[in-house]
Image (spheres, rainbow, N blue to C red):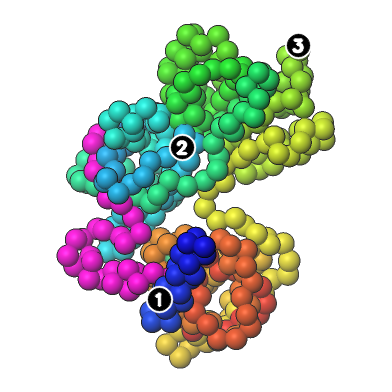
Amino acid sequence: MNKTISLWGQSLYRQFSLMLANQPKLSYYLHPLLRWNKPGVHPDYHSARIVDFRWETDQMLSVWLEPAASWSGFTAGQHLLVTMMHQGRYISRSFSISSSAALFTQQKQIRISCRIQPQGEFTQALAAGIAALPHLSISDAMGDFVLEPKANSALEQSIVMVAAGSGITPLWSMLSSLRCWTSPIVLFYCVKTAVQAAFLTELNQLAAKQPLFKVQLIETAMTGRLNLVQRLQTHTNFSLQKALYYFCGPEAMSRQFIDDLIQQGVSATAIHTELFGLARGGSEGPVKQALMIQQGKVISVDVAAGVPLLQAAEQQGLSPRFGCRIGVCYQCVCQKKSGQVLNLRTGQISGDGPEQIQLCISAAHSDLQIEL
Ligand code: FES
């Protein structure tokens, strides 16, 4: 009963906030005031003091953070959104936590490890500014890419992990958090060459002291891509159908492994993958036409299925307002006059009439008219 009242209260608050400010939380409406008082603070986020940083490889930067007491902790394998101010606006990115659960319990610290992308605005800004930054803003930890608690601990189910590049971060967090080893775990760690393999020393040390753990480095520049099923079938006494699988890396890689395993009779429920950012739902279908109106001028933009309208507008030379580009900051909200959009975060399809939409997480579901 109490739960029903609380859900009803939350829904009423949300509706009231949307009615008043077209924001799901009133705190977003008050955000300019909050910023005036405490610059760099976002209403949805917790402040996290930067304690230290270190380059793991020439492309991967680890940052140790001490979240404020309001942050409620994490389960190894989860990720969070990290936000910072850059050139007068908020930018955000998802990162997995790469540290062990013990680091947080004992020292109230976490570590994120970020691959610095040559074209990545967030990671470039982070790498350039890390020495001077006092804190970052972080969201609650989220995601269900965590080790499954075993229903029957007597059953020694093998665990197969595959990491590609920076996909090692949640897997290393899981491995370094494990207190009680009851299952054999094999990790295939795919990198172009060994110099790009972050945490390799720690992984080898773990393998040396834990007989149930094996790490196999796959240097794709030398051996080509990993054929997971073929590789596992060479292991004697290994049953593909009895193992649990955890993949973190490019979607195409995970997709290939999932298809191959399912063909071999592995249940889809035994396979876990980590996906960051927006799910590219509905990425197939005809191109739609969006008429974008900016300062009285109408520009026709062709929008491919599944492509965020913000991106499509920018490709056409338009420059709508934006912040995080992942549906968090509400800086890109604009008025849809007609047509339907697909929300890339929730998969929901909007109504046909006028309403406000977030350009960065909306894709065209029909032809549209939008006032920028
Ligand atoms: S840019 Fe932040 S919500 Fe769209």
In this rendering, the answer to whether 233 lies above or below 169 is above
Query: Residue 223 versus residue 260: which sits nearer the camera?
Result: 260
Using the numbered discs, state the Cα–Cα distance from disc 2 to disc 3 in whole angstroms: 33 Å
Using the numbered discs, state the Cα–Cα distance from disc 1 to disc 3 in whole angstroms: 60 Å
Q: Secondary structure at mark 2?
A: loop
- Residue that label 3 marks: 236
At label 1, the amino acid type is Ser
Using the numbered discs, state the Cα–Cα distance from disc 1 to disc 2 in whole angstroms: 31 Å
At label 3, the amino acid type is Thr
Disc 1 Cβ-to-ligand 1 distance below 8 Å: no
- Identify the mark at residue 75; answer none if there is no mark: 2
Residue in the image at 67% along x and 36% along y: 271
Estimate how packed mark 1 is, as few (under 14), some (14 to 19) or many (20 or more) residues with alpha carbons within 10 Å: some
Residue in the image at 45% along x and 30% along y: 173
The reply to whether the C-beta atoms of the residues labelled 1 and 2 are less than 8 Å apart is: no
Would you say residue 40 sits in the magenta stretch?
Answer: yes
Give the quarter the ligand 1 occupies: bottom left
Residue in the image at 34% along x and 33% along y: 104
- Residue that label 1 marks: 17
Mark 1 vs mark 3: give the one in front. Answer: 1
Q: Position of residue 52 (x, y in %)?
A: 25, 34
The magenta segment: 24-52
Q: Position of residue 95 (x, y in %)?
A: 43, 43
Task: Say which label, 1 or 3, has the lower sequence index.
Answer: 1
At label 2, the amino acid type is Thr
Estimate how packed mark 2 is, as few (under 14), some (14 to 19) or many (20 or more) residues with alpha carbons within 10 Å: many
Task: Say which label, 2 or 3, has the lower sequence index.
Answer: 2
In this rendering, the answer to whether 317 lies above or below 264 is below
Q: Is residue 81 visible?
A: yes
